Image (cartoon, rainbow, N blue to C red):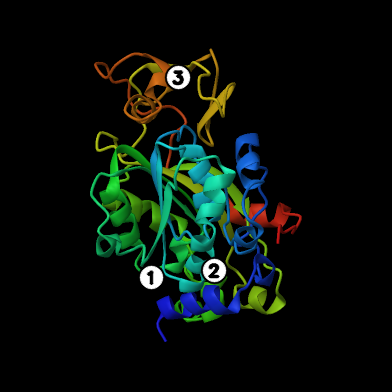
Amino acid sequence: MSVTKEVQDYYGKTLQESADLKTNACCTIKVYPDHIKEALSLIHDEVHNRYYGCGLTIPNELDGAKVLDLGSGAGRDCYVLSKLVGDTGEVVGVDMTKEQLEVANRHIDYHTEKFGLKKPNVKFLEGQIEKLSDLHLQDDHFDAIVSNCVINLCQDKEAVLAEAYRVLKEGGELFFSDVYSDRRVPEDLQKDPVLWGECLSGALYWNDFINLAKKVGFADPRVMEVAPITIENDEVQKKCEGINFVSVTYRLFKLPTLESDCEDYGQSVTYKGTMPDCPEVFYLDGHHEIKKGEEFKVCGNSYRMLNETRFKEHFDFKGDFSTHYGIFEGCGSKAPWNAADMVESSTGASCC
């Protein structure tokens, strides 16, 4: 049986709700912002119960945006996005599991009414996320792509990233959570169907992911958030002994102008506080907490991520690219987290 078929069966037949999972790899703890809580409170219970995500994959400033959800499952994140993009926006969910799509499609009218929309702004397509061309999704179409603990389930991860890059508009972003390991997962574990379904066997070694992302065009991957993964099953834990896993939310911009390293051009930005869902602080990533009204020094890449995207109108910019001062202080090539330390310090709590 192929990995694709095994994953379809695991999520379509074996799992009936999030409580059936054996690890918290696909269900990590998250404190949601108020605007996300509000949207979640309106989601149908059946959609909630079939949720297997591992992070918050909803970026800011989405009113009127076109958003694609890779591996949309029963549609929870798609429906949150549906409320946020509003009547002028568009949400497309892609999933390969028929049972999950049946749940998602059952509740389109319910959520259209709950959100007060004039007409449905979300649709669901059956297909594989590494083959978006089969679904006739256009080049340079989406403002944002999200994915929640799904890419690890695909064998051809490079194809997923390449397809995401293709259908994004320039200045758009792939904002997604997934599972990563602190070393390459052995081949024998990669053949274990339960470990695949639990989002462990397909986890990429973090440095392999960085290299793949850069290869397809995402020059400067940014870490938004990291959370340890605990395994609540002794048998699964024994199989994975020696490997540490983490859930990571990444932000990847489609900006051909980005450089491979963070370079210093003497630039800075000042946040105006004009995004309704983050009036005081905007987080470009886990290391860029930009407070309203305070001048914030940035590297050339961060400058472009704000100046050449949908965020531009919310910032004042200082400097240009006329003078180069070398590498931006503090940038380097170390691992973006220490998985072993995180797991040791974890309480072992799970949201499932």
Q: Say the numbered circle drawn on residue 200.
A: 2
Locate the N terminus by quadrant: bottom left
Residue 79 image point, x, y percent:
52, 50
Instruction: Look at label 1 and name its amino acid.
Output: Gln
Distance between the alpha carbons at the discs numbered 3 and 2:
38 Å
Q: Residue 23, percent across and down?
A: 65, 67
First in residue order: circle 3 vs circle 2: 2
**Numbered mark located on residue 155 in the image:** 1
Element under disc 3: strand
Circle on res. 297: 3
- Disc nearer the start of the sequence (2/1): 1
Q: How many marks?
A: 3
Q: Which residue is at a point 57% across and 57% down the rendered structure image?
A: 53
Residue type, label 3: Lys
Residue for point 47% across, 50% down: 176
Q: Pick the quarter of the image with the C terminus.
A: bottom right
Question: How far is mark 2 from mark 1, CA to CA?
Answer: 13 Å
Q: Is 33 placed above or below 303 here?
A: below
